[in-house]
Image (cartoon, rainbow, N blue to C red):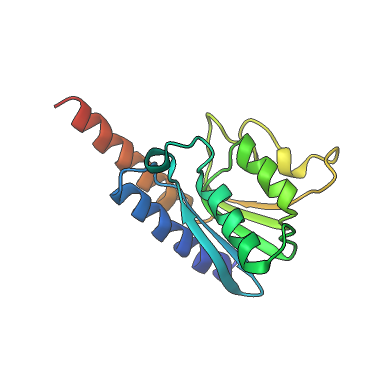
Amino acid sequence: MTEIDQKFMEVALREANFAAQIGEVPIGAAIVKDGKVIATAHNLREHSEMATQHAEIIAIEAACTELKSWRLTDCTLYVTIEPCVMCAGAILNARIDRVVYGAMNQKGGAVGSLYNVLTDSRQNHQVEVIAGVKADNSAHIMKKFFKSKRKRRNH
């Protein structure tokens, strides 16, 4: 983990906070190429009513549009929570070289918790994974969000 990783994780954390403000599960993502943020996103499943609208997927689509290519080689994806199986598949298919994430996802993580999709040598592409960057911040946003949701449900 470098200072640069921490700096770009702050961008993803801002996206996660924005998601929380609009009632979405607070996960944020940023894609960086050559030291520049080329895409940012946050979860939009509730607003779009689409199961695939995870922060990682939206950011990947925006980065592909920005680069005019489905290949996101030489890119790093920063995401506040460990990617799920769907997002890990999209990361592999986009040929992203590196993923940096904050908190682990014990119930759905596919990049260390439940599975190791991105580093599996049987895949045609492997991704460097850095876990735990600003993990406490990422976990705090999630805990705060779900605590607030439970509180509202009980009143």
Asked if residue 32 can be seen in this view, the reply is yes
Toward the viewer: 119 or 33? 33
Q: Residue at x 55, y 56 (%)?
A: 59
Toward the viewer: 130 or 49? 49
Q: In this view, does 40 lie to the left or right of 100?
A: left
Q: Is residue 126 above or below residue 52?
A: below
Q: Residue 4 is drawn in which quadrant?
A: bottom right
Q: In this view, does 41 lie to the left or right of 90?
A: left
Q: Residue 90 is drawn in which quadrant?
A: top right
Q: Which residue is drawn at 73% across and 47% down?
A: 92
Q: Picture coordinates of residue 31 (x, y %)?
A: 59, 62
Direction bottom: furthest residue: 35
Direction top: furthest residue: 154
Asked if residue 132 can be seen in this view, the reply is no
Q: Picture coordinates of residue 76 (x, y %)?
A: 65, 61
Quadrant (top left/top right/bottom left/bottom right) for the C terminus = top left
Q: Which residue is drawn at 72% across and 44% down?
A: 118
Q: Picture coordinates of residue 3 (x, y %)?
A: 55, 70
Q: Is residue 99 left or right of residue 127?
A: left
Quadrant (top left/top right/bottom left/bottom right) for the N terminus = bottom right
Q: In this view, does 151 lie above or below 35?
A: above
Q: Picture coordinates of residue 73 (x, y %)?
A: 75, 62
Q: Residue at x 21, y 27 (%)?
A: 153
Toward the viewer: 144 or 68? 68
Count of numbered marks: 0
Q: In this view, does 78 lie to the left or right of 21?
A: right
